Image: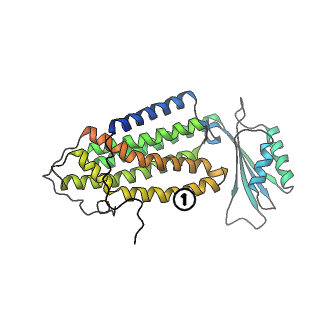
Amino acid sequence: MRLRLVPEVTSFDFFRFSKVTMGGSIVAMIASIILWMTVGLNFGIDFRGGTTIRTEAAQPVDVGAYRAAVETLALGDVSISEVFDPTFADDQNVAMVRIQAQEGQESVTGDVVLAVEAALQNVDPSLTFTSVESVGPKVSGELIQTALIAVFAALGAILVYIWLRFEWQFSVGAVAALFHDVILTIGIFSLLQIRFDLATIAALLTIVGYSINDTVVIFDRLRENLRKYKKKALVEVMNLSVNETLSRTLMTSGTTLLALIALLVLGGDVIRGFVFAITWGVIVGTYSSVYVAENVVLMLGVKRDWSKPDNNQGNQFSSTDA
């Protein structure tokens, strides 16, 4: 007996309010862009510049105690993480402390470094600083540029892949959904002022991969049904395809969210921004696979050329157990 989140056969009309859902998505994207342009993002050290300090101590690293000690100095964005390496000796406990550049300065001053060292030595007197490195605004600007290139390169590669695998209408729909997911994620980060760093960029790329996987599964079932039901209207075939893959979609998203919510609650401050981005991305990605990607294909229409054989029938996607 298998667990099902929805009945085996469903007949929900997902496109009954297609204009409303598409309009709502466009409004949400515009609002996110306005927030991005006006409020801005709460950039982390990776994009603002700052100083990275490597510490070493005889006692085990207590990240919570380190963070509490440094917070009393009111230095803004401070990231502390333990460093693991199999080559370390038993009494070699290494941590990485990253402090954002202070207002009007390219890096943390020597006095601030000494204050941080004194605060941490109150926690562990054996602690020493083995290296202090600074990241200036120029390097941070290059990181922002590289991050944008990575995101747009991923979107471009997906555009070409979907175009070659399906039709250009499917490709436009898929990339529109991905833009929707990325822009809404940036908008929520701007609204809530959650720290935005390189880990968030990694989360955005993860969201792109997750969302396109869900979209491709629905598209593949849609293509199979378009060949199977030649006389049905496009919107009817779309509804049928989404209903047939609904169980798979909800099961995949639901189990993923269970793990993500556990990490969000119990994972701690270090990974909270990364996990929140993916959690939000799974939710909007599931939504956009139907209400953005499919809506775009519905508006553009699909050329139903039945002279070509269905070489993909029965592949790993079309045979997905819904």
* Quadrant of the drawing holding the C terminus: bottom left
Residue displayed at 55% across by 55% down: 260
Locate residue 291: give its quadrant: top left
Q: Is residue 130 visible?
A: no
Query: Residue 126 location, x and y as percent?
Result: 85, 57
Left or right side of 138 for 100: right
Residue that numbered label 1 is attached to: 259
Query: Residue 315: which quarter of the image?
Result: bottom left
SS of the residue under disc 1: helix
Image location (x, y in percent) of residue 54: 73, 51
Q: Is residue 114 left or right of residue 226?
A: right
Residue in the foreground of this view, choosing between 56 and 22: 22
Q: Is residue 78 left or right of residue 284?
A: right
For the point 81% across and 42% down, the residue is 72
Seen at 52% across and 42% down, the residue is 147
Q: Residue furthest top?
A: 38
Q: How crowded is mark 1: few (under 14 residues within 10 Å), some or many (20 or more)?
A: few
